Image (tube, grey):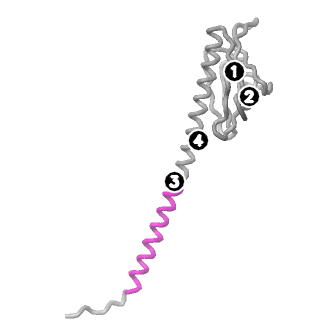
């Protein structure tokens, strides 16, 4: 016995088109998630570099204070990302290789570490004396409890 002819020849191709459109929609959502994840990964890498810079900054200040020596440190931009180091009443823009001098000093208010640099902006900040912040424009990373006062 021969099979009866079917009138559903167009149905198979229509189902195939619907399935392909559904797969394209799923791949579009997955691609968007991958792009968002890549951006988040890049931001987290930048934040990790900023924390490393803050740790180095704090270590230089602590060594200068505890050993009573003057330290000349060089800070570089992170790849092509420039950043600004903000502390007490100073802002230091790191656009290229920047030398920062950590010098222990004493005044009537006690001992502290003085920060000197050739491109310091002595703007008025409201940052406490034992806090340092790095700003990338989009976000800021901070270290708010340092061991020594910095001015």
Nearer the camera: disc 4 or disc 3: 4
Q: Earlier in the sequence, mark 3 or mark 1?
A: 3
Q: Identify which residue, 134 or 104, lies in the foreground.
A: 104
The answer to whether 15 appears left or right of 43 in the picture is left
In terms of secondary structure, what is the magenta stretch mainly?
Answer: helix
Residue on which disc 4 sits: 43
Outermost residue, left side: 1
The answer to whether 37 appears left or right of 134 in the picture is left
Q: CA distance from mark 1 to mark 4?
A: 26 Å
Q: Is residue 25 magenta?
A: yes
The residue at the point 63 percent across, 18 percent down is 60
Figure check: 88 above or below 16: above
> Residues at badges 3 and 1 in contact (C-beta under 8 Å)?
no
Residue 11, numbered circle: none
- In the rendered structure, which segment of residues is drawn in magenta? 9-34
Residue on which disc 2 sits: 92
The residue at the point 60 percent across, 19 percent down is 59
Q: CA distance from mark 1 to mark 2?
A: 16 Å
Q: CA distance from mark 4 to mark 2?
A: 22 Å
């Amino acid at each position: 016995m021969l099979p009866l002819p079917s009138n559903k020849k167009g149905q198979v191709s229509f189902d195939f088109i619907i399935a392909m459109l559904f797969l394209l929609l799923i791949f579009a959502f997955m691609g968007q998630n991958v792009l968002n994840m890549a951006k988040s990964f890049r931001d987290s890498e930048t934040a990790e570099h900023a924390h490393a810079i803050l740790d180095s900054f704090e270590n230089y200040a602590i060594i200068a204070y505890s050993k009573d020596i003057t330290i000349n440190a060089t800070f570089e931009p992170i790849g092509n990302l420039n950043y600004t180091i903000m502390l007490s009443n100073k802002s230091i823009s790191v656009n290229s290789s920047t030398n920062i001098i950590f010098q222990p000093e004493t005044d009537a208010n006690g001992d502290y570490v003085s920060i000197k640099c050739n491109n310091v902006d002595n703007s008025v900040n409201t940052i406490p004396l034992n806090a340092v912040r790095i700003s990338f424009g989009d976000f800021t990373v901070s270290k708010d409890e340092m061991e020594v006062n910095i001015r």
